[in-house]
Amino acid sequence: MNAPSFQDLPASAYRGRFAPSPTGLLHAGSLTTAVGSYLHARSQGGQWLLRIEDLDPPREVPGAADAILRTLEALGFTWDGPVIWQSQRLTAYQDALDALIASGHAYPCACTRREIALAGHPGVDGVVYPGTCRNGLAAGKTGRAWRLHVPAGEVMFMDGHYGAQCQDVAHQVGDYVLKRADGLFAYQLAVVVDDAWQGISEVVRGADLLDSTPRQIVLQRALNAPTPRYTHLPLLVNAAGEKLSKQTLAPAIRPDQAADELRLALTRLNHAPPADCQGLDELWSWALAHWSLARAPAAPVPV
């Protein structure tokens, strides 16, 4: 078994990242998050890394990953180092899972979704796992997935935009999946391993992942991995109040209208450029000179 390796950065070094999933083309919600993440890193003289979270082939759209990269390039984003593809990091995730199993932090689970739904109670992200297999598999049962043994107690952290956050992960989420029954690694494991391996100092992402942060902190502690700072940006919502996403048929960003798309994203972050600021270079220069996280809205932004 290989122990997972993590990077240590100097306290003064800033390293951020953007990590889209290729389940569709880049849309306004993802672009707004990317712009905020990019400006927050570059305005501090920091690095900005790009990672493609292609861990769920059944949900991925053929060609979407390359289209996302081309769109980001068309809008003037530049990133440090090579693009990291999670599909090429499976050995690292297995090493981390093996370390958790060896330390007693992970266990096999034989439960089906139906069994969990019947025995669990509602939580922040669906039904809370009732702990059926926590103390061992029942006779004749075979493990289908691997779960993290979540310790009791509240997890607290200070979000860079929304302030103090607190969640009782054991009660509100339960022992969550690290490797699925279909053999695919879960998002929570992969993102924690990659953020630590890449030395990410601050994660800036959409507020839809605010509730996931305590889960990631629990896992970081189990792996003895560093915990980055976390900052979440407001979601974009449609006329029905739904999060703008691929699932709600959010229209794709238009690379051939890059300056207009960037201006819109900046305006939604409450950083509307002046009318005489034209072209990508001018827009980015203005945005970097005027970026302030405190100006970004907290409430969902209607589009």
Image (cartoon, helix red, strand yellow):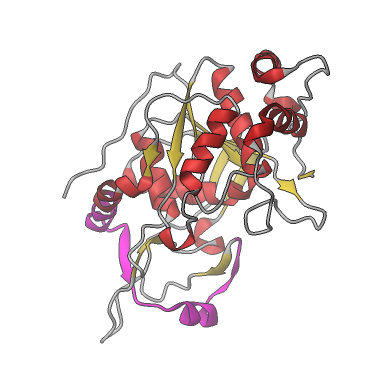
Give the image location of residue 20, x and y in percent. Answer: 51, 43
The residue closer to the viewer here, 234 or 253, is 253
Residue 278 relative to residue 125: left or right? right
Which residue is pictured at 58% across the width and 62% down the height? 125
Give the image location of residue 46, x and y in percent. Answer: 49, 19
Compared to residue 246, the image places residue 139 above or below, namely below
Q: Is residue 104 magenta?
A: yes
Which residue is pictured at 37% across the width and 23% down the height? 9
Give the image location of residue 67, x and y in percent. Answer: 52, 42
The residue closer to the viewer here, 155 or 188, is 188
Q: Is residue 114 magenta?
A: yes
Which region shows up in magenta? Answer: 96-124
Compared to residue 92, the image places residue 119 above or below, namely below
Which residue is pictured at 50% across the width and 48% down the height? 64
Residue pushed farthest left? 1
Compared to residue 127, the image places residue 140 above or below, namely below
Which residue is pictured at 38% across the width and 30% down the height? 199
